[in-house]
Amino acid sequence: MRIVPWCFANVYPVLDLKVPATPLLPNPGVGISMTACIAGIAAQSVVFTARRCKTNRRRLAASKLRPLIGASAISGEAQRESSLIPKKYLLLETDLGNVAMLLRPDSAPLTVEHVCRLVDEGLYNGCYFYRSDFVLQWGLWLPNETEVKNPYPDIAANETDSGTFLSNRPGTVAIAHGIGVNGNSDIFINLQDNDYLDTMSLGFCVFAELDAKSRRVVKDLAEAVVNGLKPVIWQASIESQLQKKEKLLEAPVYWCFLHLFPLAVSMQRSYDSFCSQWEDFKSVLVVKPKDENG
């Protein structure tokens, strides 16, 4: 039974913004009977109060920015640490071209390790993409609807909120699962903004991001599935760097072949029919050579 994400409504929190009130400055009243000295003292007091309020506002702003500066420093250190981790890609060689996905162990280390284990065992080789709507999904299913035996149990934990949070935005790659389980071998690429999947059914964990050069191939694969075709993953591998590999058939040529296939079948049938009729009339059309006696 195929495992696909379920769709429910999502409730978004409302953020209340508070605008600080403008500080009130004292308004000294100047009477007719006040002397010039008292008026000067009052004016100096107004200037002093205004400067004090300005200083207090600066101190308040600095106190609010201090935690943000600390947080940005921490996030900068986390980014530097993540940059030291060597990049790895999940590479799928398909009928319509290569699909490269950058693995994110900083977001879901257990999920990345589990997917790499399945890929290294060659379980995805020969499987096909079977779903295309708001996601492009594949798993351990062969084109003849036979399921590949998976010797590994489900992922130990749902890592939606455990590491660096990645939302189910277009181009992200996540694990599909049913209600109450963490998922195993079914994977999907988000074709649109599916951020409601972040919280639905305990969240669908994003563990990779689609490479920008693979978006065109993913679009062609999604259209092929919608048209009733079964694009095959000929080989899945984990690569440390992306290299251009030569193919027997390039994607545009193969895509044209898919569209022209019905016409090719019709032409082949016409040719077979002609050959069968040709055998019947062959004896009539062949001219026998004359003998020596004429």
Image: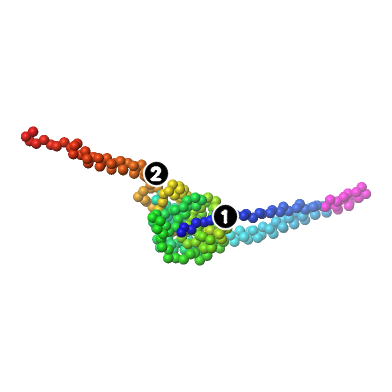
Magenta run includes residue 34: yes
Residue 154: percent from the left, percent from the top?
A: 48, 64
Left or right, 94 with respect to 31, comes to left
Left or right: 62, with 24 as reference point: left
- Percent across and percent down for residue 208 are 50, 57
Q: Is residue 207 above or below residue 276?
A: below
Locate residue 132, reporting x and y percent. Answer: 47, 51
Q: Nearer the viewer, mark 2 or mark 1?
A: 1
Q: Look at the image and tell me whether residue 34 can be seen.
A: yes
Query: Is residue 106 visible in this depiction of the protein?
Result: no
- Residues packed near mark 1 inside 10 Å, few (<14), some (14 to 19) or many (20 plus): few
Circle 1: residue type:
Phe
- Specify how the rendered protein is coloured: rainbow
* Residue lying at 56% horizontally and 61% vertically, measured from the top left: 202
> In the orientation shown, which residue stands out farthest toward the left?
293
Left or right placement of residue 279 versus residue 212 in this view: left
Mark 2 and mark 1 lie on one chain; the one further toward the N terminus is 1
Q: Is residue 262 above or below residue 47?
A: above
List the residue tagged with mark 2: 259
Q: Residue at x 47, y 63 (%)?
A: 114
* Tag 2: amino acid: His
**How far across and how far down the image is residue 268, in percent?**
31, 43
Q: Secondary structure at mark 1?
A: loop
Q: Which residue is mark 1?
A: 8
Q: Which residues are magenta?
A: 26-44
Marks 2 and 1, how far apart in space?
A: 36 Å
Quadrant (top left, top right, bottom left, bottom right) of the C terminus: top left
